[in-house]
Amino acid sequence: MKGWERQAFSVDAMREMARRVLPRAVFDFADGGAEREWTRDANEDAFRAVSLLPKPLDGAAERDLSTTLFGYRLSMPLMIGPTGLAGMYWPDGELCVARAAKAAGVGAVLSHGSVCTLEAYAAEGLAPRFMQVFVYRDAGFTRELVDRARAAGYHGLVLTIDNQLLGNRERDVRNGFSIPPRPGFALDAATRLRWLWRMRGHLNRITFGNYVRPGEASDIAKIAGRMGEILDPGMSWRDVEAMRRDWDGPFVLKGVLHPDEAERAAALGVDGVVVSNHGGRQLDGAVASLEALPRVVERVGGRIPVLVDGGVRRGVDVLRALALGASAVLVGRPQLWALAVAGEAGVARMLSIYRGELDKAMGLCGVRRIADIDRRILSAGLADEAILPVARAAE
Ligand code: FNR
C-alpha cells in the first residue's frame, strides 16, 4: 500500500488531505454551502440520529452488495453524483472519475458543468452513465444538450430542479473565487505548489466544456458570465413533461424534497427522484436530505426508485439511507476530495472505502443482500408500528 493510501483510510481523511493540497478557494468551492451553511451541516448531522440495531448472528460469511437500478446492475447501491468543474481538482478529473467508476462497477451522473465535453466522457464507456441537465430560457439549447446526450449513448437523463436560481455561496465571495479569479486567488494558489505543478498546462484549459460552441473561444469567463442568465427561473412541470416525452430511457428528477413533488413526478412517468438539497448549496434552511427521505419514500409508495444524496460519508450511511427506503445514494464532494488526493486512483480508493464499510455494516446488522435492508435494522424502526406486521410475518 502506498503512503497516501495509508493516510486515505476514510472519506473524511481524504477531505483533510484535499484541504492540505488545494488552494483554499478551490477546496472551499466544493466544501462550502449557501449562506450560514446550516443545511450543508444538517445533511451530515442527520445520519447521527439514525441508530442501527445490530443482529450479528443473522449474518453470513459473505455479503452480496450488488443491486439493480433502472435496469442496470451496480456492484453496490452507490453512484457518483454530478459535480461541476471536477477537472479543476485533477487534470481530466471527470474522465478519471468515469474510469474509476467503470472499474468499480458503479454508475455515474455527469454534471452539465463538466470541464470535458459530454462526448469525451461517454467515450470512456462507463455504464450506466447519466447526463445531468438544466432547463434553459432558450428551449432550443435545452433540446440540443438532450440530443447530444442521446447521440453520445447516455443511458439516462437527470434534470436538476433546484438550481434555477443560484444559491449565495459566501465562501466563494470571501475567497474571491470567481471567474475570472480575483487577485487574491492567485496569491492563494501560489502557495499550493503541488496542485499548481499537477495542473500545469491544464489550468488555462479549464472551461465548461459542454457550452463551448464550435469555432468560438472556450473562454470560461464569458460562459460563466452567461450562466446565471441562461437558466430559466420559470421552469415548471410543463418542462418536466416535455423532457419526459423527449427522452426514452430512464429520466430522473434531482432536487426533490417535498413529497407532493415526488408524487407528481411518479404520476407523470418520471422514472426516479433524487432526494437532495444540492449539498446545502442552494436554499440554506432547506430540510436535510435524510430527514426528507422517509416521507418521499412513503408517498411514492414503491412506484419508482428514490435516491438520496447529501452528507453520505460512510458505508454505514449508505446502509442507513437504504433502511429508510432509498434504492441507492449519490456522492458529490467525496469524488472531488478523492481526485485532489490521487486522481483516478483516489476515486478508486474512495469507492473501495464505501464498499468495505457498507459490507462490514451489513454483516454486523445481519443483512446478506441489499434487498433485505429495511427499517427492521433501525433502532427507531422497531418503535414504528407500521413495520410491526411485516416483522411478525417474516419471523
Ligand atoms: C454540486 N452539485 C451539483 N448538482 C447538479 O445537479 N449539477 C451540478 O453541476 C452540480 N455541481 C456541483 C458542484 C460542486 C462543487 C458540488 C459540491 C456539488 C450537487 C451534487 O450533485 C450533490 O447534490 C451534492 O453535492 C450532494 O451532497 P454531498 O455528497 O456533496 O454531501
Image: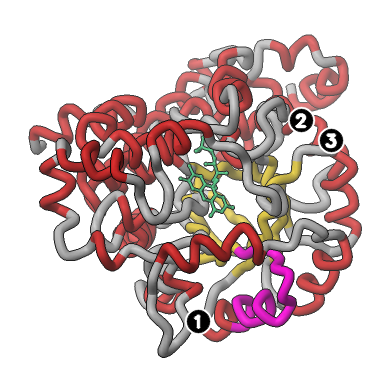
Q: Indicate yes or no: mark 1 CB to ligand 1 under 8 Å.
A: no
Left or right side of 119 for 311: right
Q: Could you say which quadrant of the image residue 33 lies in?
A: top right
Where is residue 242? Give x, y as percent: 82, 73
The kind of residue tagged 2 is: Pro
The quarter of the rendered structure image containing the N terminus is: top left
Left or right side of 291 for 23: left
The kind of residue tagged 1 is: Ala
Which range of residues does the magenta coloring cover? Answer: 133-147
| Marks 1 and 3, the one that precedes in the sequence | 1
Closer to viewer: mark 1 or mark 2? 1
Check contact, mark 2 vs mark 3: CB within 8 A.
yes
CA–CA distance between discs 1 and 2?
35 Å
Question: What residue did someone put label 1 on?
Answer: 152
**Which SS does the magenta portion mostly show?**
helix
Q: Residue at x 68, y 62 (%)?
A: 231
Left or right side of 2 for 209: right
The quarter of the rendered structure image containing the C terminus is: top right
